[in-house]
Image: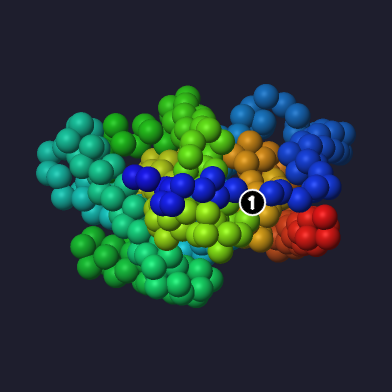
Amino acid sequence: MSWVGGGGKGEGKRGKGEGNPGAVALALNVGAFLTFALLVPGFATGPNLETVVISALPLFLLAVGQTFVLISAGIDLSSTAVVGLVSVVGGVVMSAEEGTQGGTLGTLTGLAAMLATGVAAGAVNGACVGWLRMPAFMVTLTLGMFAGGLAVWLARTVAATETLYGLPSQFLQIGGDAGIALALTAALGIAAHGLLSGTLFGRALQSVGYNARVALVSGLRVQRVILATYVLGGLFAAFAAVLLTGRLETASPTHGRQLLLDVIGATVIGGTSLSGGRGRIGWTALGVLFLALVGNGLTLMNLSDFAITIVKGLVILAAALLDAWRVRRRGRS
């Protein structure tokens, strides 16, 4: 697929004085680690840090998809609901494969159905935002509501329960085995980094997010870029659902439901601009790690879920304010 129509490069000039969001995110991680290591016994131990990393893998995959979308100057509020729908679709398909519990056929069929569901959800979002020019906020919010309701209906209709058990052991190993989950997530993260930083699509995406009208005049096929961006968001939501479903050993419409604040927060803390045009997968990884460290440290301090949510909300608000300041400064430059 060609992203360029008339022949222009389609990249606007970036403003000066935006700083280095990656360095800020790294400093936040170092500060959080040192603070909790000093205040919380057992925080800096190997087993606990391993738990922090492994538990953050689905969040990272969701945040990668959100990074692509935010760079395009959009937003995806449906990603966590899509996780639940993808999980249920996979559970229903694998449960229908009689005699394949622990076998390869059920696993492959379920994985294909899960990834196809994520891509389809992303394509609907992308088509509405790109071709119909509907507001991303409204489109993805509505699709999230639809996906959440469809997941519950599908689970209750097929399995007469919202939680599906008895999934193939080979599938469960993908998310349940820490080594496999980490290797898969690392491979997907590296692929996403290469796509964003080293391809024509990545350059086109940043140009569209920075200034869609200039990108269109420069010859970029803006609608195709937007469609592909939301498809990637749906695909990475599907991969996150695979890890969550495998780790929890059940398929459920509630998987991922509580992660929306963290998904958007991790990308913003990592330096991806809410105004579009700027973002890196490495920055997002640092944002995810920071939220994972903060959540784990506060949990070990026996704070309530409400208190942890308040702290995360304040941190994300501060990151959003910093992003707004960067955008204003870039405009003046």
The N terminus: image quadrant: top left
Residue in view at x 62 percent, y 41 percent: 280
Mark yes or no: residue 292 visible.
no
Q: Nearer the viewer, residue 106 or 265?
A: 265
Toward the viewer: 111 or 65? 65
Identity, as a three-letter code, of the amino acid under mark 1:
Gly
Q: Count the labels in the image.
A: 1
Q: Nearer the viewer, residue 21 or 77?
A: 21
| Residue at 81% from the left image edge and 34% from the top image edge | 30
Provide residue 52's location: percent of width, then percent of height: 63, 37
Q: Is residue 11 above or below residue 49?
A: below
- Whole-percent x and y of residue 88? 32, 56
The color scheme shown is rainbow
Q: Quadrant of residue 322?
A: bottom right
Answer left or right for 90 relative to 122: left
Residue closer to the observer: 98 or 58: 58
Who's the residue at 79% across and 55% down the image?
330
Q: Residue at x 68, y 54 (%)?
A: 273
Q: Is residue 299 left or right of residue 94?
A: right
Question: Where does the C terminus fall, quadrant-wise?
Answer: bottom right
Which residue in the protein does label 1 denote?
12
Residue 128, by quadrant, is bottom left
Q: Residues within 10 Å of mark 1 (few under 14, many from 20)?
A: some
Please tell me in which quadrant of the rendered image residue 154 appears: bottom left
Q: Is residue 210 visible?
A: yes
| Residue 43, placed above or below residue 6 | above
Regarding mark 1 in the picture, which secondary structure is present there? loop
Q: Position of residue 242 (x, y in %)?
A: 38, 43
Q: Position of residue 165 (x, y in %)?
A: 30, 49
